[in-house]
Amino acid sequence: MRTQVFFASTLYGAATLAAALDHGCFQPADQRLLLVSNNAGNPETTPALDAMPGFARLRTRFDRVLSWNAAIRPFHPGGWSPRADDVPLWERHLRLLWGLGEQGADEVELALESLQVDPALALARIFVDAPLDVYADGLMSYGPTRDRLDPQIGTRVRRLLHLDLLPGLEPLLLSEFGVPAEVVPSTAVRPVLAELAREAPTSVTELPSGGALLLGQYLSALGILSAGEEESLHLRMLRGVTQLGYRSVVFKPHPVAPPAVSRALEREAGDLGVELAVVREPVLAEVLYERARPALVAGCFSTALLTASALYGLPAARTGTGLLLERVAPYQNSNRVPVTLVDAVLPEIAELPPESGLLAAGARGTAAAGAAGPDGRDADELTGLLRAVGFCMQPALYPGLRAEAERYLTHRLTPGSRRYFKRRRLTVLGLPGGVPRRLAFVPRNRAVRRVARRVRAVRRAARGRTARG
């Protein structure tokens, strides 16, 4: 017997799997099981994906739906992995619990997301002989593998399934193991998302159409921004679309963001005379694209910004990516690639030409959409940027990318592209654009630092005397 176990922790991930199945990306099996995991900090108070609107539509692709949380209770999915000595016991237990047949006689195949971390990593460790397929539903798949994987796991991965959000750009994820990337085409994804949209709550179907849609990400929970900075970011989005002429705005906060995240936005909308609707239900942004058909989508670095343009042909714009490029730390942080790609291909809201306001009046022609669409950066240039950033993030995993990184930094490092690289990082790696090797001692020289402090103190004192005068 062959059993395919599809693991998902988000509704978007389950939709990606449904699209891959509809497109014939998986061979026939005796049974197909969907294993659902609720990775929220407090899963007891947060609905799992199988309780969200529209899930019943996806359910039909699978023979059964299982709960990972129930299988490992009382452990939390994000913080548990079996001890090495317990792995055989866990495999026998799960095979019996889920009806997977006998080990060594009945085959299990796994389709996993985020293989580098638990709970997907825990599953790969438990089913030690299972072939692995990895699917990616976001921009992180374009970046490097963030942690070194055990070769006994990495070499079992047969392919990486991903959405074609940036045509012509090849993902770096798992490429250190020679894993081929396979696209789940938009023609398979759109019908699945349309199914979810048909189950949208009444509050979503009644949203005004043709306005601006703002996407929140709850970056303060990741420690990237403070709560105050994130609030300011949302206000910048609102003011930016208002200056373009929009008077109807929808705000979709992150599903786990607290209700207070929208209060400042609601007050500001009242001051600006803007009609603001806040989406409280846990629906995908793509459901809003289907039902509300916004004229402009604005956000920071959400994957949904690129699904708007790649899957729906909707104009999209960004804000706050400059700050995020500075704040994301360390340089190896896996959020760096999504921030970089969104910053590179989408325009800043404040930089949109005034005529983009025509979108607010319902003008959706090619010229209007182009005002807020991808900036036309060619695939070769974007590939060069991605591979250079990827090498700087994980040089030990991708040593073969050094020559490409050197070539990019030698010929294409401009004031505009320097924001994607840290001078200190380039210096440590000995790459073009860093501090020349003969001057690399300066930051570590005590005498030089002492003189620099004295100079700064003199300058501050001089500025103080000038201000008093």
Image (tube, grey):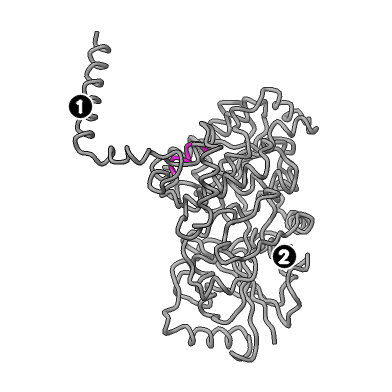
Q: Which residue is mark 1?
A: 454
- For image coordinates 47% across by 41% down, the residue present is 421
Residue 71: which numbered mark, if any? none
What secondary structure prevails in the magenta region? Answer: helix
Residue 138 x, y percent position in the rendering: 61, 54
Q: Which residue is mark 2?
A: 18
Tag 1: amino acid:
Arg
In the picture, which quadrant includes the N terminus? bottom right
- For image coordinates 20% across by 27% down, the residue present is 454
- For image coordinates 66% across by 50% down, the residue present is 169
Helix, strand or loop status at disc 2: helix
Residue 451 x, y percent position in the rendering: 20, 29
In the picture, which quadrant includes the C terminus? top left
Residue 2: quarter of image? bottom right
Q: Which residues are magenta?
A: 321-327
Viewer-closest of 293 and 260:
293
How many marks the image carries: the answer is 2
Up/down of 299 relative to 179, above or below:
above
